[in-house]
Amino acid sequence: MFKSQELKFLNNRGYLKQCTHSDQLDELFLKKKITFYIGFDCTAKSLHVGHLIPIMIARNLVKFGHKAIIILGTTTAKIGDPSGKNEQRKILSHEDIEENFQSISTIIQKFVTSDDSENQPIFLKNDWLEGINLVEFLRTYGVHFSVNRMVNMETFAERLQNQKPLSFLEFSYSLFQAYDFLHLYEKHNCQLQIGGSDQWGNIISGIDLVQKIHHGDFVCGTTTNLLLNASGEKMGKSVGGAIWLDEKMLHPNDYWQYFRNVDDKDILKFFHLLTDLSDDEIIEIKQKIDSDGSTLNDLKILLATKITEICHGFDEAKKIESNEKLKFTKNIHSDDLKNITPDFEIKFDEIVNLSILDLLKKITTDFSNSQLKTLISQNSIKINKTTISDSQFIFNADSLTQFNIQENILIVEIGKKKKIIVKLIS
């Protein structure tokens, strides 16, 4: 049983999977505030919800007063982490990596901040790797890595067993990430690395390197549980693609909707993992679920709003919540339509000659083309309560008149759970 408030909290909320020296880390948390780090390679413009668990751990440890270092791998992005991949990652240009760095750092700053101005997280590129002489690196550090052990790491072992290509470039990745930990220990006294479960081998390599170079000094690492849904599938993907944290790549409303529509079995777990609600508040939520299942719909709305608050801000989350509640009001009055915030705006001349399928694909990424056709054939698509049953339906000046349009608003219903507000503008 843990004694420190930090490990008690992280364990009770379901964040932790593995920890190299849990007892020593527990004692260390009791004695002082430490410096820890999480890292993400700059291989995309945005992170997605599958990255949220280590980010939320960092968010909470900063609240406990610990110092966070966020490594956004610009140099390691040029190599490509083979963990969890069956083939080599695409090699990115320097310009792409720099653009990704700026975008990802902006996203993480929303999640990981401190009320103490002197304890703000540090954002670093791992460009200290750029100036290293290869021969000197291998002579000084390469001698501490066992190839026998490395080929048994899960990522490499799977590639070799399945006879998939494994380049020396990828094989070297573990060395460079291990050196990152050594550099951060020497320059910032960083003693803890946090990563996803696929980073276990890389974390162990970093700990071993620090301890060999510094004669057993204490550093440790922990991995996080994957964010899985009730079916055991990785969260973060939908039919339309990843659930991105960047509002430029995924509209905040779609982000809110993703969590609004989670499986009933996932509600409590996601309150624990992805919100700032206290343990006592979540206990009250559990009691509501146990005593009255009819509250599940309201709890999903609360869940989606609380998760969206962290990523997109309180005002945006509440606006979406109010909008969604209004959409599902049985009788929306014209005054309500004046105040409603549309999800999309489309010009009148753009909707003319647009097919129903083109409109649906324009306003949602949640469904494939075949799924949309099926929904239309099942009379599950409505516009202003008028059913569209023909997938060849074309909007034009005449066909628009059947929808009794008020305040230039189209309320598009897709099945029973999704409503999208479209405003027609001149």
Image: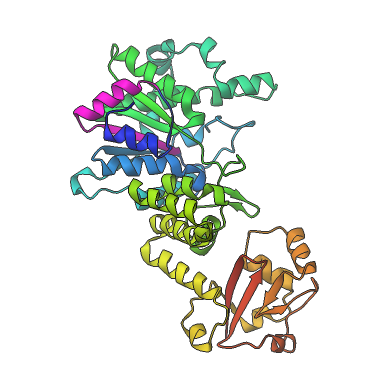
Q: Position of residue 241 (x, y in %)?
A: 61, 52
Q: How is the image coloured?
A: rainbow
Residue 132 picture quarter: top left
Q: Is residue 158 left or right of residue 258?
A: right
Q: Position of residue 368 (x, y in %)?
A: 71, 58
Seen at 50% across and 48% down, the residue is 49
Query: Is 162 rendered above or below residue 119?
Result: above
Indicate whether residue 30 is drawn in magenta. yes
Query: Is 118 rendered above or below residue 1?
Result: below
Query: Is 164 rendered above or below residue 225?
Result: above
Seen at 58% across and 41% down, the residue is 234
Indicate whether residue 129 is drawn in magenta. no
Residue 310 picture quarter: bottom left
* Quadrant of the frame with the C terminus: bottom right
Front residue of 325/110: it is: 325
Q: Which residues are magenta?
A: 20-40
Seen at 72% across and 87% down, the residue is 402
Seen at 74% across and 89% down, the residue is 398
Q: Is residue 118 left or right of residue 104?
A: left
Does the image show residue 95? no
* Quadrant of the frame with the N terminus: top left
Front residue of 110/183: it is: 110
